Image (cartoon, rainbow, N blue to C red):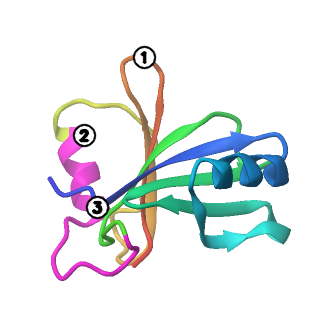
Amino acid sequence: MKLGAFSISLSVKDIKASKVFYETLGFSVFGGDLEQNYLIMKNESSIVGLFQGMFENNMLTFNPGWDQEAKTLKTFDDVRDIQKHLKSKNIKLENEADDTTSGPASFVVLDPDGNVILVDQHL
């Protein structure tokens, strides 16, 4: 199964303070919009998303269809196919992508310890 680009999405209290902190660790802004309270920061192949006021808990995030540079992959597993596979293995989904659609979609699943995993396809 190809899950695409990996990042951690952090729910932060003060996005400006978090931006400065991660810049000190060698990260630079790769995407997002500070005025909309989210930034994607990158240090080599490591990606950290900073999100203020958008969700409650930190999440592991996978983006089918993207590499670590957010460039489109020639081949990838569609989010709905990944979802179908997980459901066939009796994995409970917290929310689901509409399997009658194509293109951008996402679903959320929890690992056995309650860690949130977002599978978010942008194409």
Mark 3 — residue?
4
- Residue 46 lies, in percent from the top left, at 42, 54
Instruction: Return the disc, 1 or 3, that comes first in the chain's sequence.
Output: 3
Q: What stretch is highlighted in magenta?
A: 69-87
User: Relative to 78, does residue 113 appear above or below in the rendering?
Assistant: above
Q: Which amino acid does label 3 sit on?
A: Gly
Query: Is residue 82 part of the magenta span, yes or no?
Result: yes
Q: Are marks 2 and 1 in contact (CB under 8 Å)?
A: no
Circle nearer the viewer, 2 or 3: 3
Residue at 33%, 71% (x, y): give it: 66
Residue at 34%, 69% (x, y): give it: 100
- Front one among 45 and 100: 45
Mark 1 — residue?
113
Tell whether 114 sits left or right of 56.
left
- Front one among 7 and 107: 7
- Front one among 59 and 26: 26
Residue at 36%, 31% (x, y): give it: 92
Q: Which secondary structure lies at badge 2?
A: helix
Mark 2 — residue?
87
- Residue 105 lies, in percent from the top left, at 44, 66
CA gap between label 2 and label 1 equals: 18 Å
Instruction: Return the disc, 2 or 1, that comes first in the chain's sequence.
Output: 2
Instruction: Return the disc, 2 or 3, that comes first in the chain's sequence.
Output: 3
